[in-house]
Amino acid sequence: MTSHVTGRLSGRVAVVTGGAREIGFGIASRFAAEGAKVVLAQRSKSEGAAAQAQIRAAGGEATAISCDVTLEDSVAEMVNRVVSLYGTVDIMVNNAGVGGAEKITDLDWAEYQRVFNTNVGGVLLGTKYVARAMQAAGKGGSIINISSIQGVLPLIDSAVYAGSKGAVNLITQQTAADLGPFGIRVNAIAPGYIDNEMMHGYHDLISKTPGSAIDTARRSIVLGRLGQTEDIAGPALFFASDDSAYVTGTVLLVDGGSQCHGAVG
Ligand code: NDP
């Protein structure tokens, strides 16, 4: 785990949905190392407990709360628990997401509902309840949505996932406009190819030869390497901290420059 004890988020309360694993865990552990009280919100109790223990072992403050971002009552209850525990929410990272790939002619309606309910519904519900808590506290806040390069440059066989992330980008801009008057900033990070199971799973689905599609994708990255979860934590810290006090409604591509060549699939 990265250790940066500079306290740029000292005393702030940050919720990270899907914070127990991969990109979410990278963000949560970086925020904790910067002094934030971090809440890890995902469905798995065991992964939440393990991630909480890992952050605490590194000297950070973390609490795992089980939450399903597709269920309104579950999101409302999670935010209520955070407010009871810490009094407020200063930072929300709507990171929980699911991927997949299929040809449009094979569109599976249950899969569409799973992806949209999580990637789009989760962002809407997380924003609704956290923005209410932030408005009640009257101190403003920062909401960070984890989108994808696919929301800007769709890859092949990806109508559902790319469509969900395109929606996240527009929701980011729209809610930034709604919430700006309350001092609540809303920005999105659009990761490129992050070297983990979700990304390899997608590329194996679209490729007849496991590994071959990702080799093609790798060639599009001008910085010459796949991204790591730590590559997303730094930009998230920027949006969470006062360094971005005058930034709202933006979608930041964090993709090693793969957009310079256009999408490869
Ligand atoms: P992972 O699959 O490794 O982690 C996803 C996290 O989201 C898990 O903690 C999972 O926990 C949680 N989650 C999934 N569904 C729900 C739900 N209904 N309610 C609450 N939590 C949920 O994915 P990554 O870390 O790779 O991805 C994180 C984000 O980054 C996603 O939004 C993804 O779309 C985006 N992204 C990823 C890229 C990549 O290359 N990996 C590239 C671009 C964007 P649990 O199952 O316990 O609920």
Image: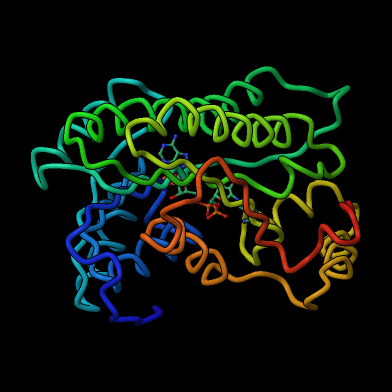
**Up/down of 151 relative to 192, above or below:** above
Residue 258 falls in which quadrant of the image? bottom right
Nearer to me, 196 or 248: 248
**Up/down of 63 relative to 3, above or below:** above
Residue 25 placement (x, y as % from top left)? 41, 61
Task: Name the residue at 63% across, 30% down.
Answer: 170
Nearer to me, 51 or 182: 182
- Lateral position of residue 198 relative to residue 204, left or right: left
Is residue 258 in view? yes
Nearer to me, 204 or 36: 36
- Lateral position of residue 157 relative to residue 48, left or right: right
- Lateral position of residue 243 relative to residue 260, left or right: left
Quadrant location of the N terminus in the rendered image = bottom left
Q: Residue furthest top?
A: 109
Residue 27 placement (x, y as % from top left)? 42, 62
Task: Name the residue at 70% across, 58% down.
Answer: 192
Residue 224 placement (x, y as % from top left)? 80, 78
